[in-house]
Image: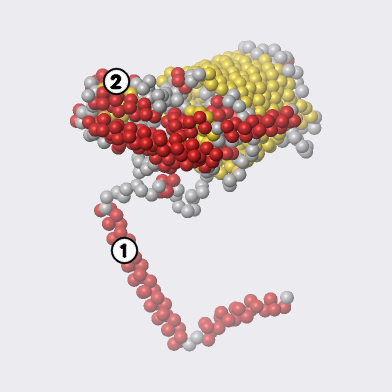
Amino acid sequence: MHYRSIAPGVLALALATPAFGASDADIAEIRNQLRDLKADYEARIRALEDRLKEAEARAAAAPAPAPVAPAAATAGGPSNAFNPAISAILTGTYAHLSQDPRNFAIAGFSPEGEVGPGRRSFSLGESEVTLSANVDPHFAGVLTFALTPDNSASVEEAYGQFLTAPYGISPKFGRFLSGIGYLNEQHAHAWDFVDAPLAYQAFLGGQLRTDGVQVKWIAPTEQYVELGGEVGNGDAYPGSERSANGVGSSALYAHTGGDIGDSHSWRAGASYLHAHSEDELGNTAASRLGIADFVWKYSPHGNVRETYLKVQGEYFSGRIRDASRQDGWYLQGVYQFLPEWRVGARYDRVDPRGVDGATYEPRKASVMVDYNVSEFSRVRLQLARAQMRGDLTDNQLFVQYILSLGAHGAHKY
Amino acid sequence: MKNILWKSAAAAAAFAAISAQAALSVFATVPEWAALAEEIGGDRVKVYAATNALQDPHRVEARPSLIARARGADLVVATGAELEVGWLPLVLQQSGNAKVRPGTPGYFEAVTAVPVIGKPTRLDRAEGDIHPQGDPHIQTDARNIARVAEALSARMAQLDPADAAVFQARTRQFLDRWNAAVAKWEKDAAPLKGARIVVQHKAFGYLIAWLGLQEVAALEPKPGMEPTTAHLAEVLATLEKQPAKMVLRAAYQGDRASQWLAQRTKINAVALPFTVGGTDGAKDLFGLFDDTIQRLLKGAA
């Protein structure tokens, strides 16, 4: 212990000695050496600068080099060669709504989350950034975060995937869009309409994200059969945050589908969600929800670049937080009549079945047209007529843009 | 539920093991590699083509049927160079088939066997839907088919050693026939040398280089973007200075723009099969090039 406290003193003394002990001659000598050193380096720097100028002049005079190095386009330098694939989605909307969106409510339902038509006038949508890469030979990771117009950030998805599981099993863990239904797994920028169907808003608060674990299995058959199961903490509506160990929500689903000839393809499925919730007073409740979904696409010879027709529908039925059984559905069709142009129509309806005294069935009809100058940009006009109450009609107009930057997105079915 | 799931998984695995012994299951992204795998494998392979000649291979969706087929594949044969970037990664990831992940022997990319041309000097989406690793439409040069055949045969032999001798023998036979055919096609196509052409999509770079054609314009203003009237007017102006014989499009592309140009300039609109199945004549790989050369000669006449 003792010698440690002495050491810094000795060191300080040793360092100070040359300065204290130096004669004028020594100082002059050091000054000379420094001057020489400086002159030497300045000369060298000048020489290097001259060489650089020469090299630049030669490069400008020479013809453009032939693109030979295959690595040049794919990798930057050694420090960013392993950067994940990055993509960003920019969206924005102009909305003209005849009813004040602050009074939006779906009679008989009290969902939490992204519900309603959004704000009036111009609004910035969520700007989404996705990073994805393989982690090692066994894992891949995806992070999607959204920057909201009120300057907050949220984690949309952040999950790892186990890649080398046998028997067609793919496990996923973290936060991810649940595999229930058809539309739930799609990000908002891939939707065919500006907003989620009423049934998704009423039963799932827009979209269900699970913090937990998902396991999917694909059957080794020519017919597509997918079985999936998820367990999570149940924080997302219709669940709620609870202080409880174990599983807060669980979901099971099965999907099947295939092609009929070259021109038709389809997918259909059934899903079941069970979630626990707890209110401020500590009263617990359970939600049980079933979803049936189907999608059918027709495209001559299967060439979706040119034209296609897509029809999809989903039916929801369940008891939310111990309420009596309620249901809702939507049906929509989208027709791409030219490579750049699509038109679509959707009808939504939910039935509160007298919960909270609500007997009117909220409904909404939407039509849209969008223009896609390339695969990476979309501008959409949507008109909708929403009747949340029998005596109130909300006429809505939306203009929306969706731009995707960076890594090539996937063409999800 | 769980019990049933595990039992069916085990049964499925057993089934997969049996069928793997029977024949190598090949998932080809485009018809030309499906045809080539059949030439090499004969009855020792079971081949599935994920797309047909009338589909734009850039714009395929990860359909349920593709996921199910990729699930059971022993070998995925892709073109590579990001031709399938929009759908194949998603199909492979969703299939849960670890055997055919990129980087494993079960994943083969044809571009690795050929010299790639058309690498963009400027990587920017303002240039359209460009392919950063170069032009992926390698199958339009018949010599590339031979190069891919050798590499694919070696890969199939590696995955299925029991049938390696069959694959090697069949590949040798195929290459003998193929090289003779290539010599004939080159002789037949000699009058096409220097012929000026217009293309709809820049998809014929290898064909142009092989036969010595001369591309004077493209109808798509940028790769992957639909022709606009303003750009077509520019093409017309170019054609006044440099008259072309014909405008080429692949069978999967709409004929609106080509027909528009053909009506105004009296040049021939030629639809090429582009891959196996694109026309009635392109029944197999040999038919693909027989028909392509014939259509070009007719268009140039």
- Answer above or below: position of A299 versus B203: above
In the picture, residue A376 is in which quadrant?
top left
Q: Say which of A323 and B151 sits in front.
A: B151
Q: Say which of B280 and A93 sits in front.
A: B280
- Answer above or below: position of B14 versus A37: above
Provide residue A224's location: percent of width, then percent of height: 59, 25
In the picture, residue A98 is in which quadrant?
top right
Asked whether the viewer can see residue A316, the reply is yes
Q: Quadrant of the N terminus of chain A?
A: bottom right
Using the image, tell me which numbered label, if any, was put on residue A160: none
Query: Seen in the image, is A312 located left or right of residue B265?
Result: right
Q: Chain of mark 1?
A: A
Tell me how far mark 2 sits from mark 1, CA to CA: 57 Å
Q: Residue beneath label 2, please?
A: B260
Mark 2: few/some/many CA within 10 Å (<14, 14-19, 20+): few
Residue positioned most to the left: B241
Secondary structure beneath dot 2 equals helix
Q: How is the image coloured?
A: secondary structure
Residue under the image location 19 percent in, 30 percent down:
B241
Q: Residue beneath label 1, please?
A: A51
Residue under the image location 59 percent in, 18 percent down:
A313
Q: Chain of mark 2?
A: B
